[in-house]
Every structure is written in C-alpha cells, then in structure tokens.
Image (cartoon, rainbow, N blue to C red):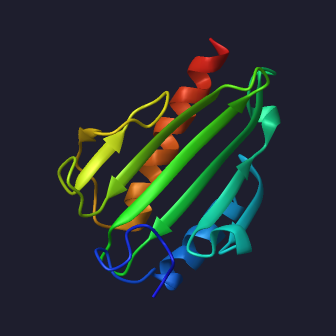
Amino acid sequence: MPDDEFAGETGPIDTDVLRRIARRLDTSDRFVEVLYRPEAASNAVVAEYDTAYFPAAIERASLQIQWFETDDFSIHYSEQYRDATNWECRWDRHPNDHNTRSHYHPPPDATKPGEDASYAVDWRDVLTQVLTELDEHVQALWN
C-alpha cells in the first residue's frame, strides 16, 4: 500500500499510468526534469518546469501527480517566487469530506474546501486539461 494521504480511500497507486505520465511529460519542452516516483515522492511523478518558461520573478515551478488504480488522482502545481511567496493550485478526484469527489483547489494557496469540478476519466484527457490551464496561466503572467 502506498504511503500517500489518501491510501485506503483511493486504492493503490497506478504505477503503469504514472510511468506513462512521466514519459509524456518528458517529451515536453516545459520541463527540465521529470522524475518517476522519486525518493521524496515515491507515490508520484514530479516534473520541474524550465524557469525560462516564466517571468524572472518565479524562482521555481513544479507539478506533482498521483494517479490511483481507481482513476482517482491528485495533481498539485506550485510556483515559488523570489520574494518567498508561493502560488499553488490542485486538481483532485478522491473521496473527501470537503467537496464532491472531483474538485479543484484554486490559487493562490489551494484552499479547502475547493470548487466542485468535472474531469474526464482517461488520464490523457485530464493531463491535457491541466497542462492547457497551466499554459494559459503562464501566458497571463507574461501579459
């Protein structure tokens, strides 16, 4: 059983889907490093954005993805600014007591409760949705 916060409610991590997600992210120029189940997050894929993708005020940006055999997931995006502030949001589908199973925790701090949401079942569609939303966010940072 994985050592994640939702274990027992969502079931085990889907290592096959995580491997596929890592391969997909690794083909994107957005990321300088994509780690499949690193020691610090052994139940996830962690992708570090290329900071050249962002305005100079952003020191680091990353995406952490967990996908479960039940097709539940948690996708956490985080930006760290040079002034020590953070900007975070999270897309989730998992059992909880604060929202419907599918929900979104909006920025700037991924607050609870989130907003009820609807997501596709297939991981490819969910990943496309999240990356599109993040691309729009990054574009807005430049405007």
Residue placed at 43% from the left, 63% from the top?
124
Q: Nearer the viewer, residue 105 or 124?
A: 105
Q: In percent of the image, x 58 and y 57: which residue is there?
A: 64
**Where does the image place residue 134, in percent across and percent down from the top left?**
53, 37
Farthest residue, direction top? 143
- Quadrant (top left, top right, bottom left, bottom right) of the N terminus: bottom left
Q: Is residue 101 above or below residue 61?
A: below
From the viewer's side, name the closer residue of 12 and 47. 12
Residue 28 visible in this rendered orientation of the protein:
no
Quadrant (top left, top right, bottom left, bottom right) of the C terminus: top right
Q: Is residue 34 left or right of residue 138?
A: right
Q: Position of residue 99 (x, y in %)?
A: 20, 47
Decide: is 42 above or below 76: below
Quarter location, residue 61: top right
Q: Is residue 60 left or right of residue 24?
A: right
Residue 56, located in which quarter of the rendered image? top right
